[in-house]
Amino acid sequence: MALSTQRPVNLDLSTFRFPITAIASILHRITGVVLFFGSFILLALLGLSLDSEAGFADTLSLLENGFVAFIVWGVLAALAYHFVAGLKHLFMDMGYGETLESGPLFAKVSLAVAAVLIVLAGIWVW
């Protein structure tokens, strides 16, 4: 019995065009991972700030560092997108946005709202 040779041998992922709903889903998963690891950094900063007055001053000086501020902004950005995408999933659980027409619309709206929140978080951090 001969096997079909029409199967792709090497898949080039850069040639795939993912739908907006797939991109939103992948970003939701990625931001969940970022939040998991970022929470350790934020808890370390919180612990240092609550340790003593000197620890609080050290935390403030750390937050003035551009790299640390970027890390904090990244965690806040992940939180903003993950929160908005979670709300989108709650609406979908209630029966809204499950059709082929409304799914991409909900994904675009969640990306737009998250983008606004991410910019606001950047303004707040810097």
Image (cartoon, rainbow, N blue to C red):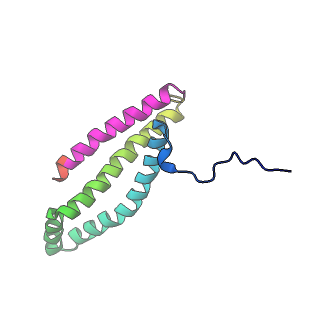
For residue 3, side relative to residue 69 (left or right): right
Identify the residue shown where x is 35% and y is 50%: 79
Identify the residue shown where x is 31% and y is 56%: 75
Q: Nearer the viewer, residue 99 or 9?
A: 9
Q: Position of residue 64 (x, y in %)?
A: 14, 63
Q: Nearer the viewer, residue 53 or 32?
A: 32
Instruction: In the rendered view, tell whether residue 41 sits above or below residue 86.
Output: below
Report if residue 91 lies within the magenta region: no
Report if residue 107 lies within the magenta region: yes
Q: Nearer the viewer, residue 114 or 2?
A: 2
Main SS, magenta residues: helix
Q: Position of residue 71 (x, y in %)?
A: 27, 60
Identify the residue shown where x is 35% and y is 66%: 40
Instruction: In the rendered view, tell whether residue 21 sits above or below residue 48.
Output: above
Instruction: In the rendered view, tell whether residue 61 sits above or below residue 103.
Output: below
Q: Position of residue 13 (x, y in %)?
A: 51, 50
Segment colored magenta: 99-122
For residue 110, side relative to residue 5 (left or right): left
Instruction: In the rendered view, tell whether residue 120 sits above or below residue 61.
Output: above
Q: How many marks?
A: 0
Q: Position of residue 114 (x, y in %)?
A: 33, 40
Furthest-right residue in this view: 1
Identify the residue shown where x is 75% and y is 47%: 4
